[in-house]
Structure formats: structure tokens, C-alpha cells
Image (cartoon, rainbow, N blue to C red):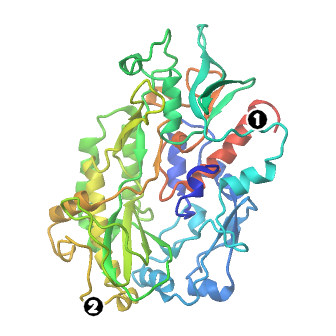
């Protein structure tokens, strides 16, 4: 499928945070900070605002047109929701709790409740994604050829010299026939979070033990890859009755330790968890812990992102069995961590390229992640009981099965157990080919070149060193736009 996951995902276009991107640079990636990357966020999309009346209904007072100065190919818009009072109630509820957005969500610094835009063309009411926005306008170029449904076996690397390996092309299979594509300047891998590291490993970029354990014999290993898979942590969801019918998407951020309901007095103990679990780890884990610590100590930074929609998601009991859909109209309020310390891994599973890689996300394995997500899950109760949103919910109505009562009144350990048994992935993995110094476990340098090679780059979500907040789509486009300029700079064509 042309367009990858941008052709099938939920279309949410969530902005990243300045603090997140600046942390990329502090890892040892010069040229990767908010000041440098923000123009590329803007370059990738065009925001289409609704009428002033609709803006008032959707609570879009925080939108600053100056923060959306781009005229990019991805079309972003807001839903036609004039008759839907819930979106406005969502924003108003957070405003009354003192959590009105501190700025435009795309300014890099924000908090509070807002209505999030989607990648929908405002005129045609169709999905705007990489295939129709980037590929279709240039598909007739004579120097462009697209092969659909190939299986890339490996990048052909010449590692015969004592220096860095030279990428000379790639080998792939299509319709049971093998092909070799020769490359002159360089090879760019952009196969996604799981397939990009898979291709690198089959090409000899991994530890010899792992490769030989899977039946792959090499005369020389180009790079001992110590990369990690970072996974945006699982989402905990709570269900309450609501009489509305339209689907909408809203988003809110909350700095949990700044609110009494989420334990403002417990910040020192949370910081102690970081010190006990992270500071003695690898150079990367130590720097990641420093980043998360700075988020917790900054009252303007949020650690959790809440979103809501008028639909029942998949329900799961404490035994892991799915429940049948409950009759009626429901509002789902969910929360996910915006910064986390748990990390997993992704590696080849066999010498057979048709077998998918094996991965272990290890979600919520770091105790701080579980602590924060449990506290944020508690705060959903506060949101649901606050006006004007509370008036739209049926008093005493059905809620998520197996929910252990009002989460604000049960012990935090009970909430943690509920989170562990009922949380789900948000399916936004990153960082399997992380861009950062080699000694910190990075796979690529700040020019996105794979360490140990002269002309092999990875450009996709796998290169992002620290998971962005929320959906990764806008950040992937920004990284790709930045990569295009880097490549042109390296060849003197910019």
C-alpha cells in the first residue's frame, strides 16, 4: 500500500513539544532542536481553519495563525461539529479546572484542553496522507520508479576496506524473482519502525552473535547495533455513558503532579524512583532519565495526554477476555504517557526474511511509568465529574467492566493493578534505529547516516531518538523534510 500507515491510521495530527525535540539535540545530535525543526513541521502541512463560529464552538481560541505559517502538502482541518456540544464542553471543562491551553498546540509549549485537527482535506473531505500529498504530484518524474509489494532482503554493503562500508545497492524479491538495484550516491532505508532495523540486521548491521544465532554468516559485521525500541506507553481507558452520537477527537495535556488529585505532594518520591532505577544504567538511559526528571520538575510541562471520543473501544476484562459491546451511547476518555522510561527491543527472528521480526515492547516495565499512568488514570475521574462535561454523562451509568470503583477513592496500588491488566498500546513505536552518538547506542548520526557506513541513511520513525508526545505522524513528516535538506546540503544541491 502506498503511503504506509498514513493511509490507514486515525488521521490525528498531533504537534510535538519543544522540550522533546530539544532533548534530541542534547543527546549529541547537532542541528536537531526545536528552533531548527519547527520550520519543517510548518513546511509539511497546511492548516484549514473553520469559520469563526465553528472555531468558537470547538474552543479554538488558542490557535495562533502565526504558528501555522506553512503551505505544505498535507491538508489538516477541524471537524464540522457545530451541532456537537461535547467538543466545546471538553475544552470548557479543562478551562474551569485552570487548564486552558498556555499557547497554540503547535507552538511547542502547551497544556490544557483543545480540539485536535485531523489530516482531512477540508474541500474534498478525504484523507490527506503521504501518497496523495507527496507522491501523486511527482509520480510522472522520469527519475522516479516505484515497485510495490517487494520484499527487501538486504542492502548490499562493500565492507572490504578498513574504513566505513560503502552501500552499493539493495537486493529485493518481487513475484518470486530476485532483483538487484545499483545505487550511485547512496541508499536510503525508509521501511518503518520494525522493517528498517530488520533490513539493517540482514545487511550485517548487528552483533555477530545475534546474526549467527539466526543462521546468517558474515565475513565482517559493519556495526554492532545496540539500538532500543522505544514505545509510547499503553493507554488506559475508562468508559462512561453519554447521550451524544457524533464522533469527535479532542486532546488535553495535564502536568499530573501539579494537581491535588494526582498527588502533588508525592513528587519527591517519583523523582526518587528515577534515581533508583535509571541513573546507574547506560549513557542513553541516564540522559533519558534526566529529560524525564526535568519534565516532572517543570510546572509548565505535562506528563500525560488525555483524549476523548464518542465510541466504545475494545473492552477487556481482568482475565484478558473481551467483553461484548454494551448497548447505549458512550464517551471514552483515555490517557497515555507523554514521556516515559520503559524501553524494548526489535530484532530479526530467523534467517528467513519472510518471517516478521520479534519484538518486546516492555511497556510499563519501569516503575515510574506505571506510577504516572496510574495517577493519570485516577485523574480521568476528576475530568468526568467536572462541569460542563459531567452534565452530559448519565448519573450512575455503566462504566468500564472490572473498574474498581471510583479510582480517586481506592488505593493507588489497586489502580496500578487495573492499569497493568487493562491498558493497551497506542501503536506509536519509534527509535529502533535511533539517531544519536554511537557510544550511546545510536544507529545513525545527526546526518541520519548509519554508523560504520559512508552512504547509508535511515529516514523514518525509527530514527527518532525519543518518542514524541501523542501521534508520531507530524514528527515523521518533519524529520523527512529535514532529511531532504540534509541530503541536498551533503551533495551541494541546496
Quadrant in the picture for residue 361: top left
Q: Which of the two discs, 2 and 1, sits closer to the camera?
A: 2
**Which residue in the rendered view is the most extreme toward the front?**
176
Establish if 422 lies above or below 384.
Answer: above
Judge whether residue 443 can be spotted in this image: no
Residue 220, percent across and down? 50, 11
Q: Residues within 10 Å of mark 2 (few under 14, many from 20)?
A: few
**Residue at image coords 53%, 22%:** 203
- Between 214 and 493, the one lying in front of the other is 214
Q: Is residue 308 left or right of residue 7?
A: left
Q: Is residue 263 left or right of residue 227?
A: left
Residue 397, percent across and down? 26, 86
Q: Residues within 10 Å of mark 1 (few under 14, many from 20)?
A: few
Establish if 199 lies above or below 295.
Answer: above
**Residue at image coords 31%, 90%:** 394
Quadrant in the picture for residue 360: top left
Residue 452, percent across and down? 56, 20
Give the distance between the C-alpha atoms of the residues marked 2 and 1, in whole angstroms. Answer: 61 Å
Q: Is residue 142 left or right of residue 156?
A: right
Judge whether residue 388 can be spotted in this image: yes
User: Counting residues from the N terminus, which is met first, the one under dot 2 or under dot 1?
Assistant: 2
Instruction: Give SS at disc 2.
Output: loop
The C terminus lies in quadrant: top right
Residue 407, percent across and down? 21, 73
Q: Which residue is mark 1?
A: 489
Picture disc at residue 395:
2
**Residue at image coords 69%, 84%:** 51
**Residue at image coords 35%, 19%:** 213
- Between 333 and 68, the one lying in front of the other is 333
Q: Is residue 266 left or right of residue 143?
A: left
Amino acid at each position: 500500500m502506498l503511503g504506509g500507515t498514513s493511509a490507514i491510521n486515525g488521521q490525528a495530527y498531533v504537534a510535538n513539544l519543544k522540550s522533546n525535540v530539544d532533548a534530541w539535540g542534547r543527546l549529541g545530535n547537532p542541528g536537531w532542536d526545536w528552533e531548527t525543526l519547527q520550520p519543517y513541521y510548518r513546511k509539511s502541512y497546511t492548516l484549514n481553519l473553520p469559520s469563526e463560529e465553528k472555531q468558537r464552538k470547538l474552543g479554538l481560541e488558542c490557535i495562533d495563525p502565526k504558528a501555522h505559517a506553512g503551505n505544505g502538502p498535507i491538508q489538516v482541518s477541524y471537524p464540522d461539529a457545530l451541532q456537537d456540544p461535547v467538543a466545546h464542553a471538553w475544552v470548557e471543562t479543562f478551562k474551569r479546572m485552570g487548564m486552558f491551553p498556555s499557547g497554540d498546540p503547535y507552538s511547542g509549549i502547551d497544556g490544557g484542553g483543545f480540539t485536535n485537527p485531523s489530516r482531512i482535506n477540508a474541500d474534498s473531505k478525504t484523507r490527506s496522507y503521504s501518497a496523495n500529498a507527496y507522491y501523486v504530484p511527482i509520480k510522472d518524474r522520469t527519475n522516479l520508479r516505484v515497485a510495490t509489494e517487494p520484499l527487501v532482503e538486504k542492502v548490499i554493503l562493500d565492507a572490504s576496506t578498513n574504513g566505513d562500508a560503502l552501500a552499493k545497492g539493495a537486493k529485493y524479491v518481487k513475484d518470486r524473482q530476485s532483483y538487484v538495484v545499483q545505487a550511485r550516491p547512496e541508499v536510503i532505508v525508509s521501511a518503518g519502525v520494525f522493517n528498517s532495523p530488520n533490513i539493517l540486521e540482514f545487511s550485517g548491521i548487528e552483533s555477530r552473535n545475534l546474526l549467527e544465532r539466526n543462521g546468517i554468516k558474515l565475513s565482517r559485521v559493519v556495526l554492532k547495533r545496540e539500538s532500543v525500541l522505544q514505545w509510547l506507553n499503553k493507554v488506559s481507558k475508562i468508559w462512561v455513558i453519554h447521550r451524544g452520537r457524533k464522533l469527535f477527537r479532542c486532546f488535553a495535556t495535564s502536568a499530573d503532579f501539579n494537581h491535588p488529585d494526582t498527588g502533588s505532594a508525592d513528587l519527591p518520591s517519583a523523582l526518587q524512583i528515577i534515581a533508583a532505577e535509571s541513573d546507574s544504567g547506560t549513557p542513553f538511559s541516564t540522559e533519558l532519565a534526566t529529560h524525564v526528571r526535568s519534565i516532572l520538575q517543570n510546572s509548565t510541562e505535562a506528563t500525560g495526554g488525555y483524549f476523548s471520543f464518542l465510541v466504545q473501544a475494545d473492552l477487556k476484562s481482568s482475565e484478558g477476555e473481551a467483553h461484548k459491546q454494551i448497548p447505549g451511547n458512550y464517551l471514552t476518555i483515555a490517557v497515555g504517557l507523554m514521556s516515559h522510561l520503559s524501553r524494548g527491543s526489535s530484532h530479526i527472528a530467523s534467517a528467513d526474511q519472510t518471517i516478521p521480526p520479534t519484538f518486546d515492547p516492555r511497556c510499563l516495565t519501569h516503575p515510574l511509568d506505571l506510577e504516572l499512568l496510574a495517577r493519570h488514570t485516577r485523574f480521568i475521574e476528576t475530568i468526568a465529574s467536572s462541569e460542563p462535561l459531567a452534565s452530559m454523562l448519565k448519573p450512575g451509568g455503566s462504566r468500564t467492566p472490572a473498574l474498581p470503583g471510583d479510582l480517586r477513592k481506592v488505593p493507588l496500588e489497586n489502580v496500578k493493578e487495573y492499569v497493568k491488566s487493562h491498558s493497551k498500546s497506542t501503536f506509536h513505536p519509534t527509535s529502533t534505529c535511533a539517531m544519536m552518538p554511537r557510544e550511546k547506542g545510536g544507529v545513525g548520526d545527526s546526518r541520519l547516516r548509519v554508523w560504520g557506513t559512508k552512504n547509508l541513511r535511515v529516514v523514518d520513525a525509527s530514527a527518532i531518538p525519543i518518542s514524541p508526545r501523542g501521534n508520531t505522524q507530524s514528527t515523521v513528516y518533519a524529520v523527512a523534510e529535514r532529511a531532504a535538506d540534509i541530503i541536498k546540503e551533503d551533495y551541494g544541491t541546496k
